[in-house]
Amino acid sequence: MERKKSNLAVSVDVTKSKDFLAIIDAVGPFVCLVKTHVDIIEDFDQSLVQQLQDLSIKHDFVIFEDRKFADIGNTVALQYSSGVHKIANWSHITNAHPVPGPSIISGLSSVGLPLGRGLLLLSEMSTKGALAVGSYTQEAVRMARAHRDFVIGFIAQRTMEGIGMQENTVDKDDFLTLTPGVGLDAKGDAMGQQYRTPRQVILESGCDVIIVGRGIYGKDPGLVDEIRAQAKRYMEAGWEAYQDRVSA
Ligand code: 5BU
């Protein structure tokens, strides 16, 4: 993030590998991270993974497969390492719902730790009516603190710093907060998504990284110049809000 002066992550939710790679190459210079949902790609094969890794080196970004694991330890270890996608082989970080309890972290770390991978826990969601609130969120943060060797942060709507801690605790967290549900032009979509601006997310809510999907690639993945311009716009808005937060 420091090296590129960017706290922008782009979520590339398209179904054709040609569009997927074109968007990533266009936004690459502006992002610290690219977030994927590889299970929506219709023509997925291992060569796509190789090309994604090449782009990650070319543009200096981290790869995050947004897999949202949610099963028992043994099953998630298999889902993470095996199957068609073999996520652990190429995705630097992935994420999990805390709903099964700490065993989900043990299962995933048995695969990911030896490979130097990291995990984000979903302690909140951006959707209307989300159930990840209150004591659920607090327990997610406690689970993360108990597994600092593998958990590097959260997907959440605000910083998780201090959540669930006793008052006057001097212990400081050092977790990242990555936040989806970010848009400069829309307030939401027709399926429950809710958007806030980079300023609300980074400056007011104390998050670190904005995750932006349709706000950047829009409806037509072929409009590469427009996608590049939007990526630059979101990168500048995110970084300015971050600078304002750290200098406040
Ligand atoms: P959008 O096009 O900017 O709305 O895409 C948001 C992305 O972030 C999409 O890939 C979702 O799966 C993902 N997401 C989210 O929107 N809200 C959440 O709480 C979580 C993930 Br967790």
Image (cartoon, rainbow, N blue to C red):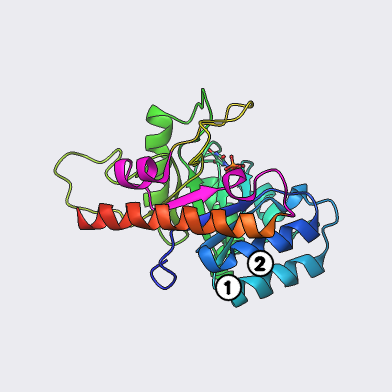
Q: Residue furthest top?
A: 129
* Distance from the alpha carbon under mark 2 to that under mark 1: 8 Å
Q: Which mark is residue 93?
A: none
Name which residue lies at 77% across and 66% down. Answer: 48
| Label 2: few (<14), some (14–19) or many (≥20) C-alpha neighbours in 10 Å | some
Location of residue 137 (image quadrant): top left
Left or right: where does residue 42 sit relative to residue 5?
A: right
Name which residue lies at 68% across and 48% down. Answer: 13
Name which residue lies at 50% across and 51% down. Answer: 120
Whether tag 2 and tag 1 are in contact, CB under 8 A, the answer is yes
Report the number of numbered marks.
2
Q: Which residue is mark 1?
A: 59
Q: Secondary structure at mark 2?
A: helix
- How far across and down, in percent of the image, does residue 215 sit? 57, 44
- How far across and down, in percent of the image, does residue 34 sit? 59, 59
- Depth check, front residue: 128 or 138: 128
Residue type beneath disc 1: His
Which of pointers 2 and 1 lies earlier in the amino acid sequence?
2
Report the image quarter containing ligand 1.
top right
Name which residue lies at 25% across and 41% down. Answer: 165
| Label 1: few (<14), some (14–19) or many (≥20) C-alpha neighbours in 10 Å | some
- How far across and down, in percent of the image, does residue 75 sit? 69, 48
- In magenta, the rendered stretch is 197-222
Q: Which residue is mark 2?
A: 25
Whether residue 146 appears in this view of the structure is no
Q: Secondary structure at mark 1?
A: helix
Task: In the rendered view, tell whether residue 180 sits above or below residue 36.
Answer: above
Specify the quadrant that holds the N terminus: bottom left
Residue type beneath disc 2: Asp
- Label 1 CB-ligand 1 distance < 8 A: no
